Image: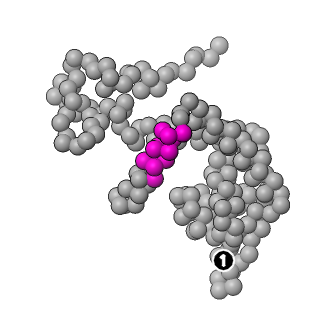
């Protein structure tokens, strides 16, 4: 019998803010949000308050789960799905435009486009001024696959946000948009 999965570090430690250990001291950073504490004279990152940790955990768990399910049911992974979704959003997009739309690197976009094209889900046209540059569109087969995956993606989103009231979700989306804007400034 396989061993039970180990709980994440956050689950093991709990929220250090709400139940601090006497040996922990918050570091006064002068910022409104503090994701560190001091223990034995060393500054320690408190993952229970570190925003990038939560974003990474949610992304990784959601992407791994989605990719496994999409591969099993539809023969495509999460990157392929994201490329398909971008082509429904903006039919006739180039690979570089897809990268802009979904914040994807060129290599991943190229691999996904090649795979989707080989599987018969895409149509493309070469640009008049540069035959190497193509614009991509989902064909009827690709749109049918998109519709099938979309149903599952929306079901998974609904499960992800289960128990979160609409006002909290609206605030969360507004905060995430602000963070995306902040990232543009960070480089």
As drawn, is 185 to the left or to the right of 111?
left
Residue visible at 75% across and 39% down in the picture = 72
Check the picture and name the quadrant holding the N terminus: top right
What colour scheme was applied to this rendering of the protein?
Answer: one colour
Task: Reply yes or no: does residue 175 show up in magenta.
Answer: yes
Residue furthest toward the top?
A: 1
Q: Is residue 118 visible?
A: no
Q: Position of residue 128 (x, y in %)?
A: 69, 85
Residue 181 inside the magenta-drawn segment:
no
Residue 183: x, y in percent? 39, 56
Q: Quadrant of residue 116?
A: bottom right
Q: Is residue 162 left or right of residue 187?
A: right
Query: Residue 146, can we see it?
Result: yes
Dot 1 alpha-carbon crowd within 10 angstroms: few under 14, some 14 to 19, many 20 or more: few
**Start and end of the magenta stretch?**
166-177
33 left or right of 80 in image: left
Per the image, label 1 sits on a secondary structure element best described as loop
Q: Position of residue 184 (x, y in %)?
A: 40, 60
């Amino acid at each position: 019998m396989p061993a039970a999965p180990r709980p994440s570090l956050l689950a093991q430690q709990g929220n250090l803010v709400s139940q601090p250990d006497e040996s922990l001291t918050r570091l006064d950073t002068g910022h409104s949000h503090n994701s560190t504490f001091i223990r034995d004279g060393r500054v320690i990152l408190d993952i229970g308050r570190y925003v990038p940790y939560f974003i990474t955990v949610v992304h990784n768990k959601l992407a791994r789960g989605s990719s496994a399910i999409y591969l099993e049911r539809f023969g495509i992974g999460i990157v392929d799905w994201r490329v398909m979704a971008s082509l429904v959003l903006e039919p006739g997009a180039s690979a570089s435009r897809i990268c802009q739309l979904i914040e994807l690197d060129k290599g991943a976009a190229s691999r996904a486009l090649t795979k989707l094209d080989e599987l018969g889900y895409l149509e493309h046209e070469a640009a008049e001024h540069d035959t190497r540059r193509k614009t991509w569109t989902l064909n009827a087969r690709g749109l049918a696959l998109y519709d099938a995956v979309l149903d599952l993606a929306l079901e998974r989103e609904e499960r992800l946000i289960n128990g979160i009231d609409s006002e909290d979700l609206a605030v969360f989306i507004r905060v995430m948009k602000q963070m995306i804007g902040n990232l543009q400034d960070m480089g």
